[in-house]
Each structure stands twice: as C-alpha cells, then as structure tokens.
Amino acid sequence: MDHFQYREGAYYAEDVPLSTIAKDVGTPCYVYSRATLERHWKAFDQAFGDWPHTIYYAVKSNSNLGVLGLFAHLDSGFDIVSSGELKRVIQAGGRPDKVVFSGVGKTVAEIRYAIEQEIRCFNVESLQELDRINSVASETDAIVSIAIRVNPDVDAQTHPYISTGLKENKFGIPIADAVQAYRHAENLPHLHVSGVTCHIGSQLTSLEPFEDCFYRVLSFIDELKTEGIELDHLDVGGGLGVTYKDESPPHPTEYTTKLIECLKSHGCELPVMIEPGRVITANAGVFLTEVQYIKDGDERNFAVVDGAMNDLLRPALYQAWQEILPVNLLSASAERVYDIVGPVCESADFLGKQRTLKVEAGDVLAVRSAGAYGHVMSSNYNSRPRPPEVLVDGDRYYIVRERESFEQMIRGEFIPDFS
Ligand SMILES: *Cc1c(COP(=O)(O)O)cnc(C)c1O
C-alpha cells in the first residue's frame, strides 16, 4: 500500500499533485512520500509483535538525508556498507549505537572510523576482515562486537546480480567453514562475538528461500552452542521483495510469522535484527520525467524523455520493469505503444519498453517504485546533473536535495598547465 493515487485524473503523492512538483521543481526529479515510508517501516516493526527485534534500515536503498532523518525520528537502526553511509546516518541524527556495518571490502580507515563512532556491530565477511578489525581495535584497546556473515548456499530465485547467498557469490563465509571462523574470532582479544548474520539476496518474492536460510542458520547456531559459543543476536539480513508489476511477495507479517515459527521450533530465543531496504523505500517513491519528443520509428514509437539511465539505472542494469503512468490522465492524444527512452547515447538507455500510453510532448510521466536503488545509483554520465529529491508530507513538500548545478558537477576537477 502506498500513498500515490489518482484524483480526478491527476496523479498525487499524498495530497500534492505531482504536476505541481514537476512545475515547481522541474524534471527529472524524484518524489518520496513520508506517509508511505513510515507505513512500510512500521508494518515491519509491528509485524514482530513482542519478539525482541530491531529494524536496521538498509541505507544503500535510499540514503537521502531527509529520508534518513525520518527513520532516525522513528528511532530506527541502520545497516550501512561504507563510512560515507555512517557519516550520513550521523548527520541525519541517527544513533551510531544502532548501526551495523555490512560489506565485503571494509578498509582500515572505514573500520577505524566506525570503531570511533562505537557502532553496534560489524557484520564480517572473511577471516582476513576479522583479523583486520581486531588489529584496528587494538590501536585504541577497544572491544568490538562482530557477527559473521554466513553464506548458507541457498538459491534466492532472484536476478543473478542481486543474488548473494550462493556458493559462487563473493559474500560471507561458507556455512560449512563458519564454525572454524567463530573459533578464530573467539581467540582474537579485541573482538566480542555477538551474533550471526546472513543476507541471501534482494527482491525475493517467496518465503521458501528465506525459510531454507533460517533453518540452516538456526542449525548452525545449535552447532555453535555445542562448541560453547553463545550468541546474543540473530541478524536475518534484508531482501524481501516488492510489487513492481505482477509479483506478489509475502507481506512483512507473513515473513515474520515464518521467521518466529522457525525460531520457536528450534527453541531459539535470540533477539532478531533485520535489514530491510527495498521493501520500505521502493514503492514510497516515483521518478518524474517530461516527454520531450514523440519519435516514430519504422518498428517502434519512441517517447524521448528528459530522464535517463544516469538518473534511474535499474531498467538498464537489471532489465527491471517499473510501471510508467501519466501524471495527467486526461490527455487528448491517441493511445499508442511506446518505448520510453532517455537522451543518453546508449541503447540501454530506456525507462520502459512497449508501454501503452496516451502521451504527447510536454506531458509528465511518473515512473513508479523508484524510491529504492533509484537516486542512490545515479551518476553524471553524459555530464547530466543529478536530479533533485522531494519529500511529500501531507499537503506540503520539501526539497530534500537540490538539483545539482554545473559548478557542483565539476567541483574538484582541474586543468593542468599544458604549456
Ligand atoms: C542490500 C542489503 C540489504 C538490503 O536489501 P533489500 O533487498 O533492499 O532489503 C540488507 N543487508 C545487506 C547486507 C545488504 O547488502
């Protein structure tokens, strides 16, 4: 459920017509709905009932300071994958002691900064990283909490680029080798072995791979117990999918019901950490773009828009399908089938293919489900400034990121003296 809907032919975000935002802020731009973000976050939080849990919102899905500020206001935790994301969380008023740090490539500088900020836990992906964290912690005689990311070797049945829980993926330590890794961690004096973590992929639309993963990880926790290694939390990662087109992913309540059932059947009472990203932000955002030209080809008709793959990469990168709707339904133009393409010099530069629409030059289109992995993946390719971001709250809206200026785009570049 989201708060984008038509009222008398005009597409709204909460109580603000999107055409108003397109006019005032310009296109292309991203628009998020506070009510939707909050609703999705709370749906997850409430789905756990009395089971002790903390939501660690996956910052990488949407790291705008306004969005992070909203989650900080809800007293959310945060799952980060770089020191830049940690800085954003702190800047937005989030608590470092509610941060977990994931990722395969943490540098010494990133680890040092996160230790200084006293984050809740490092989610560790290799033996080498355990050693590195221990060594950095020893500089200040700190004791640092860690969880090891185990790779349970389950097929998430999602796009290969966002599948992370198979043996062939770079993520985590194979579950068969993980006891050894825990013994190693227990022997490192600056580490406190706190939990176990897993994350098998993104945009999962059925419960089965999750259930497989839970059982494997819970059996693993039992195995650790027989080794005398007791944990204080279980982190189940993120990955719950959303509806882009006709997927029907489980509701957060179905997910948590299954999880709690698995926990109970294993007699496991550990507090749960969860790292949802997409399921909270994807359908809380749209991308607005204006049609520049209608171009009729021999085989296809094109609607050339002012938004492109540099602004919204998912269609080009994952062949992702996102719904495209006119902001004004009452266009007099004829219904036709279009490829919605951007101005970038790549054939991969499309937002949607073979879409039936009534559009003409000057109309504004809304690409739905653009709140996750949208602006965060944008670039300056073709020297296009990155688009602004707007947060709607009831009948008001805030510009939470301005459109990038040319000066901002070239800041930090220099021309050598060629004489
Ligand atoms: C990307 C990621 C998440 C969030 O994934 P979603 O599919 O957006 O929920 C959570 N945890 C880790 C470790 C990740 O890499």
Image (cartoon, rainbow, N blue to C red):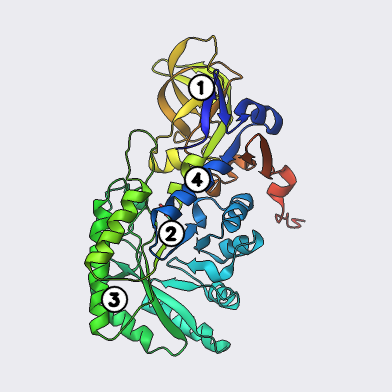
Relative to 114, residue 180 above or below: below
Secondary structure of the residue carrying numbered label 2? loop
Secondary structure of the residue carrying numbered label 3? helix
Q: Mark 1 points at which residue?
A: 303
Identify which amino acid the numbered label 1 is placed on: Ala
Q: As drawn, which residue projects farthest toward the front?
A: 50
The foreground one among 7 and 197 is 7
Residue at image location 34% in from the left, 68% down from the top = 172
Asked if residue 254 can be seen in this view, the reply is yes
Q: Mark 3 points at which residue?
A: 178
Q: In terms of sequence position, does the residue under pointer 1 or pointer 4 come before the other? A: 4
Question: Would you say the beta carbon of the disc 2 residue lies within 8 angstroms of ligand 1?
Answer: yes
Q: Name the residue under label 2.
A: 275
Q: Mark 4 points at which residue?
A: 39
Asked if residue 372 can be seen in this view, the reply is no
Identify the image quadrant of the N terminus.
top left
Q: Which one is in front in this view, the residue at disc 1 or the one at disc 3?
A: 3
Residue at image location 58% in from the left, 34% down from the top = 14
Residue 135 place in picture, x, y as percent:
49, 85
Instruction: Give the spatial CA distance, label 4 vs label 3.
Output: 37 Å
